[in-house]
Each structure stands twice: as structure tokens, then as C-alpha cells.
Image: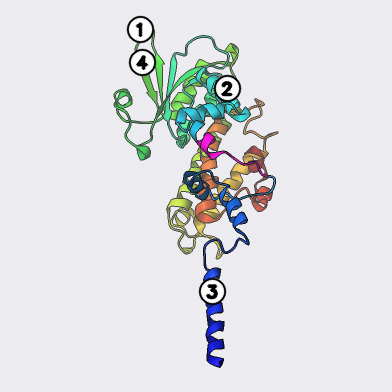
Amino acid sequence: MCTMLVRCLLAVASVKLARSFSPGARFESSAQLTTAGARFESSAQLKQATRFNLKDKPGATQMSMSSSAASLDQSWSGLQTLSSRTPVGAALDAEKEARERGVGAAFVQNKLRMFDSQEAPRLTLYRDHAGWCPYCQKTMLLIEEKEIPINIELVPMRSYGDKPQSFTRKVPSGLLPALGVQTSDGREQIITESQVIMDLLDQWHTVENGYRGMMPEESDTSGQARFRQLANLERQLFSFWCNLIFRPEGPSFGGGGMISKIMGGGGSPDMSGSMQGFLECMKTVDSELASTKGPWFFDFADHPTMIDFIYVSHVERMLASCAFWKGLDLRSDEYRSKLPSLNAWL
């Protein structure tokens, strides 16, 4: 009798265990199972829903997978069409069209700058495609500030690939930037070296003809002397920056002279000579900026001039490289107080 009772109890337990693992056991009735399965019209829809991890949400709008997936044009042109129907997409399309006419905003891949001119430009600037070359940048900044009509051809820097033969035939050295000048007989004269290009562009587009001046007047001897002094200071700053970033910061060798700083020594126990030299030179630049009414290096104009562009193309790169490689953030609160004029200028 006892054995029979045990067998009956084991049988009942086995049946309950089997039911607990059977498909659909989490539904209390066959009606619930039918309702749950009716959410999907086909096995294809079930796969699609599973792929996108769709979940029921109270009040959420249900998407018809069969109609939407079939009607959506997922080609690139289709996506562009959909994008253009949005306010942001329409604004971007309008800006692109304006840039193609040469009248849009400044942009690294612009190929034409007309400003208010109605005549086809006779100048062509060959500049880097990626917008990383500092010499192309300062040339382009001057063009934008003076609003000089110009064609632009984009050429890769060597680090981004081979230069096209159409460019190297004109500029065998491959130097960027280069300026092409259309002559009266239809030829193109090529000029290289960024400072030469900037000087010529400023001389050809004078204040008398409605363009912004970039240099002190020739008769302003003190202004001309200040420009030369600031240009030399920029070269010193550039040298200190290269020493800091590209040379190892070694222990102090004593002496504190230029050679010691170049070798990475001559600093304090907490700072290498190359770091100290760089910061001291940057402090001198800050002082030169503080000597004007601000924020530019010269007071003869209320806009940035030639020397501002010469500096900013490298100073921008100094900010990034010093922060990344040396942990020196020249835009931090600490250096905003130590270099206030430089930060106001930036």
C-alpha cells in the first residue's frame, strides 16, 4: 500500500514537471497563447521583429513591417531625398548650393570664393584637401578677411596620398600652398611660399580698392619695425614649441642658456628647460598682445591683420599638441589667468 502511494505521488510530480517545461506553459490558457501568436501575421514578420528587438509598449504606435519595409528606398539617393525633406537637411542643401556659387560660408572644401564680385576670378589657390596645413590655413584666412575672389583647387598633402600629376606638372616640388595667376595671354604663372603669396595678395588688393589692409603703411616706420619684431618672435615661439614636442625632455644640465633649453635641461626641478623656454616665450607673446588696445597685435585696424594670421595657424596646433602630448592646457583657468591677452586673442 505504501509503495503504491509513493508511485502515485511520483507520477503526479512527473506530470507537473513536464508541464512546467512545455512550450506555452507560461500562458494560463490556450486563448492567451493564441492572442500572443496573433501579433505576427507571418513567420517573416516574426523574424523582422526579433531582429530589431521590438517590444510591446502600452500606447506605442505599432509599425506595419510589411508595408514600411517594402516602400522605404534605402539607396543613397533615397536617403538624400528623405534628408532634404527635413528642416536641417533643407538648410544644409541651401548652404551647399551657396558654396558652389562661391557665396556661402567659409568651408575647408570650398572650391570657389566670389564674395560680392561678379567677375570670374583670375587667381587660383592650390591648398591642402584636409585643412591641416598651417601655411594653407593662414593664406586662406587672409583671403577670407580681405574677401578676395579666388578659385580653389584641393590637393592632398603627402601624408594623405600622392599629389595628382595635373598639379605636379605645375608645381614639380609639390609645395603647398601655391598660387596660380592667369596672365593676359592665357597662361598660368605659379607662385609658391605662403608668405610671398600673402604679401602679393595684400599688395594686389589695396585699401584704396575697398579691401582691408593687412600691413602698416610703408611710411609707418615704427609699425613696420614692430611687424618684423613680431615675425621674429613667432619664429622663436615655433622653435621652442618644436623643441618641447619633438625632443625628449631630459634632466637639467644647468646653465639655463639656449643650448641647455634645446637639450631639454636648464629648468627647475618641477619643469624641464624646454617647457620653461616655451612658456617664457608664450608669456612674451602675451605681453605683446597686452600692449595694444586689443585683441589684435596692431591697433591700426579693427580686424585681424597679417601678423595675426601668421601666429594663429601655429598657435592653434600648439594648443592641441601641448594638451595631448604634455598635459599642458593653455586654455585652462590657470593659464587664462597667466596668459589673459593670448586667450582673449584666441
Determine the secondary structure under disc 2. helix
Measured as percent of width and height from the top left, residue 178 is found at: 40, 26
Q: Of label 3 and label 1, which has the lower sequence position?
A: 3
Residues at discs 3 and 4 in contact (Cβ within 8 Å): no
Q: Distance between the residues labelled 2 and 1?
A: 37 Å
Q: Is residue 279 visible?
A: yes
Measured as percent of width and height from the top left, residue 223 is found at: 60, 28
Q: Of label 4 and label 2, which has the lower sequence position?
A: 2
Q: Quadrant of the N terminus?
A: bottom right
User: Residue 128 or 184: which is nearer the viewer?
Assistant: 128
Q: What's the residue at 48%, 48% (across, down)?
A: 47
As drawn, 67 above or below 52: above
- Residue type pointed to by label 4: Glu
Q: What's the residue at 43%, 19% (across, down)?
A: 124
Left or right? Give the position of 179 relative to 61. left
List the residue tagged with mark 3.
15
The quadrant in which residue 25 appears is bottom right
List the residue tagged with mark 1.
185
List the residue tagged with mark 4.
188
Tell me the mark number nearer the camera, choosing from 2 and 3: 3
Residue 261 within the magenta-colored segment of the rendering: no
Q: What's the residue at 52%, 62% (across, down)?
A: 23
Q: What stretch is highlighted in magenta?
A: 60-69
Q: What's the residue at 55%, 29% (across, down)?
A: 82
